[in-house]
């Protein structure tokens, strides 16, 4: 079995008989409401990927399933997790896809020369207390020719999950592990000065790297590929690249090579480079990313316009009426989860903070501020709150400065 890397969480597993399973094909820049860009820029095109034998889609986030340009032959089987609300399957069906290989949690199915085992989210939240937790992620274990690889993508495992996986699969040849904290913190939080944001960025990255150092000795993989969440921000929010919750895969690999107390081979790949998993060998020479060139590239894309910037400003009375309707519907939508949200949530319209959610804790407040054109799109389902948040389009202020992950999850249901 081999793995050919494309970018971010995208790549192709190649079986011993030549079967190709494409994973999470985000190819074209501009996901998360036009904000995310690949670095280095990709040469691969969607047309280059039309002849694969199957496509694994881990979850619905657009850097894994880019529904703007998801255009593949309808007879290619789509491998998806069959658990929970399954927003991904519903979206695919709307686009005319129905050839699914659906896998329940911890279920193994055969696909050509592969054995495939899927997993729902291993934890509700890997670092924060959460009642609701992760609703969408998955992980995939691929076995072929006595070789085992685990594509964790964004489904970060805790120690308990790693003990379980090590006990079940015994010999793990490759673990593809997420090393970042893609999202709005700290880049979009106005509680901090720029210097404080940079310090928070460093703290979060070290926290994530240390977590990998704690779980890899339990998982005991022969090799580790820092994987997923590799991106830069283009457009007017380009300056937030300085303190995103992510970094290059090289930085993660360097940390693991210095701090990891287990003899896993840590390596990185560039676009179209291949790793021979069975023989633990990189088939091409790897060249580190040039950070100075990356900064120059960021400067070259800082003037890219987001689509919502072409809209006319919404009528304020109409916008306020839609906010009121969305707030009322939000209450009904969240009832099905049977949880009490802690934070009060306010959204800024001009100089006024309008309360849109009443939380359990009167003294815990989250203030949100965004372009009203984007807000109008979110309210009318032409954009999505979670995508706008991860795309760094929403600025936040929270009092006190304490994470409330359930509120951020539930804001996905804020629309008319």
Image (cartoon, helix red, strand yellow):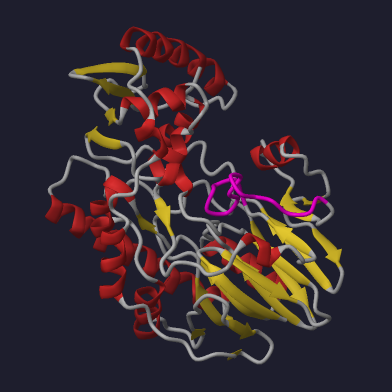
- Residue 159 % position (x, y): 52, 64
- Residue 122 % position (x, y): 58, 54
**Left of 171 or right of it: where is 152?**
left
Image height of 93 relative to 367, above or below: below
Q: Residue at x 37, y 37 (%)?
A: 404
- Residue 62 % position (x, y): 54, 48
- Residue 235 % position (x, y): 32, 48
Q: Main secondary structure of the magenta part?
A: loop
Q: How many marks?
A: 0
**Left of 262 or right of it: where is 145?**
right
Tell me the quarter of the picture where residue 249 sits. Answer: bottom left
Image height of 371 relative to 331, above or below: below
Which region shows up in magenta? 59-74
> Residue 69 in magenta?
yes
The quadrant of the rendering that contains the N terminus is bottom right
Q: Residue at x 59, y 90 (%)?
A: 283
Residue nearest the observer in this picture, 85 or 163: 85
Whether residue 69 is visible, yes or no, is yes
Whether residue 186 is visible, yes or no, is no
Residue nearest the observer in this picture, 151 or 361: 151
Q: Residue at x 34, y 39 (%)?
A: 393
């Amino acid at each position: 079995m081999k793995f050919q890397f494309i970018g971010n969480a995208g790549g192709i597993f190649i079986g011993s008989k030549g079967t190709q399973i494409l994973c999470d094909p985000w190819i074209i820049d501009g996901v998360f409401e036009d904000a995310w860009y690949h670095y280095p820029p990709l040469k691969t095109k969607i047309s280059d990927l039309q002849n694969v034998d199957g496509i694994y889609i881990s979850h619905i986030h657009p850097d894994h399933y880019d529904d703007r340009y998801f255009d593949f032959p309808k007879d290619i089987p789509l491998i998806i997790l069959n658990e929970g609300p399954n927003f991904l399957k519903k979206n695919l069906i709307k686009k005319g896809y129905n050839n699914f290989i659906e896998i329940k949690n911890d279920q193994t199915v055969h696909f050509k020369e592969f054995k495939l085992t899927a997993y729902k989210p291993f934890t509700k939240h890997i670092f924060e207390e959460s009642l609701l937790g992760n609703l969408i992620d998955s992980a995939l274990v691929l076995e072929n020719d006595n070789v085992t690889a685990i594509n964790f993508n964004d489904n970060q495992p805790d120690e308990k999950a790693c003990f379980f996986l090590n006990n079940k699969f015994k010999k793990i040849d490759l673990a593809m592990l997420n090393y970042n904290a893609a999202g709005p913190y700290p880049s979009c939080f106005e509680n901090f000065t720029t210097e404080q944001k940079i310090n928070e960025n460093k703290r979060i990255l070290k926290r994530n790297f240390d977590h990998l150092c704690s779980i890899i000795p339990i998982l005991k993989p022969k090799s580790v590929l820092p994987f997923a969440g590799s991106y830069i921000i283009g457009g007017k929010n380009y300056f937030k690249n300085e303190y995103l919750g992510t970094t290059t895969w090289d930085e993660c690999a360097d940390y693991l090579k210095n701090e990891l107390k287990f003899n896993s081979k840590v390596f990185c790949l560039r676009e179209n480079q291949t790793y021979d998993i069975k023989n633990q060998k990189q088939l091409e020479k790897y060249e580190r990313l040039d950070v100075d060139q990356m900064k120059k590239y960021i400067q070259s894309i800082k003037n890219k316009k987001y689509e919502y910037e072409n809209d006319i400003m919404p009528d304020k009375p109409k916008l306020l009426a839609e906010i009121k309707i969305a707030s009322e519907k939000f209450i009904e939508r969240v009832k099905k989860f049977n949880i009490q949200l802690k934070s009060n949530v306010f959204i800024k319209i001009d100089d006024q903070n309008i309360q849109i959610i009443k939380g359990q804790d009167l003294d815990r407040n989250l203030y949100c501020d965004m372009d009203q054109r984007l807000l109008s799109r979110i309210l009318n389902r032409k954009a999505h709150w979670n995508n706008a948040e991860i795309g760094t389009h929403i600025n936040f202020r929270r009092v006190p400065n304490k994470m409330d992950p359930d509120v951020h999850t539930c804001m996905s249901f804020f629309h008319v």
